[in-house]
Amino acid sequence: METPQHKFNAPIPGESLTAELGSRPWQRPPQYSDINEIVEDYVTKMNTDEFSKQLADTMEMGIPLTTLANSIQLAGVMQGKHTVDTGILVMPILIESMMAIGDALGIKYNSGLEDDANLLKNRDSLAHSSIMKLRKEKEKTEGQVPISQPVEKESEMPMKTEPMGLMSRRAE
């Protein structure tokens, strides 16, 4: 016969997900608080041959430099090097540095900057074309009356509507 286990001698659910306050690098004061120090740290690391080779491989895969810069600065936040806000301020410098490395190596890269402009442009044109398509369909179904012109109707008696829904009261 087996001995019953003590149920009260087990870990509390979620206990592994907690840590003491200040035990994580991002919960302590950052290593760098000045933007110039942060930029110097990143540029020093980017000027190594190892980083250039890895960056070249990543650029050839077509990954946007904006995504890489965001990943790099987020890793810096997680390591406790700087705060989130200073990391966001450094991102344009990271992108320009990676673009300079790509230009020096003669690699065609996706900066990720023009994609946003093209995406917004395409989104606006798609929205405009879909609106125009809906207008044309509505004109055909309503007897060639453009949507922009108000249609005057005879005064109608307001229709009595029954309350609908799960919690509505019903007339008996």
Image (cartoon, rainbow, N blue to C red):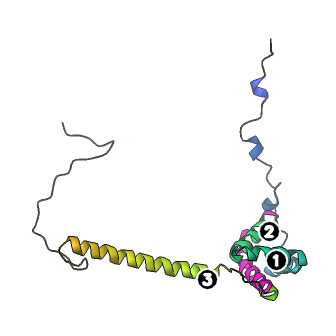
> Are there few (<14), some (14-19), or many (20+) residues within 10 Å of tag 1?
many
Query: Residue sitting at 49 percent across and 79 percent down?
Result: 122
Asked if the residue under mark 2 is in contact with the one under mark 1, i.e. CB atoms within 8 Å, the reply is yes
Mark 3, secondary structure of its residue = helix
What's the amino acid at mark 3? Glu
Q: State the residue position of label 2.
A: 76
Classify residue 33 by image quadrant. Answer: bottom right
> Nearer the N terminus, badge 1 or badge 2?
1
Q: Amino acid at mark 1?
A: Ile
Residue 23 vertical position relative to residue 57 in the rendered view, above or below? above
- Distance in Å between CA atoms under marks 2 and 3: 26 Å
- In which quadrant of the rendered view does residue 69 lie? bottom right
Residue underneath mark 1: 38
What numbered label is drawn on residue 114? 3
Q: How many marks?
A: 3
Camera-near label (2 vs 3) is 3
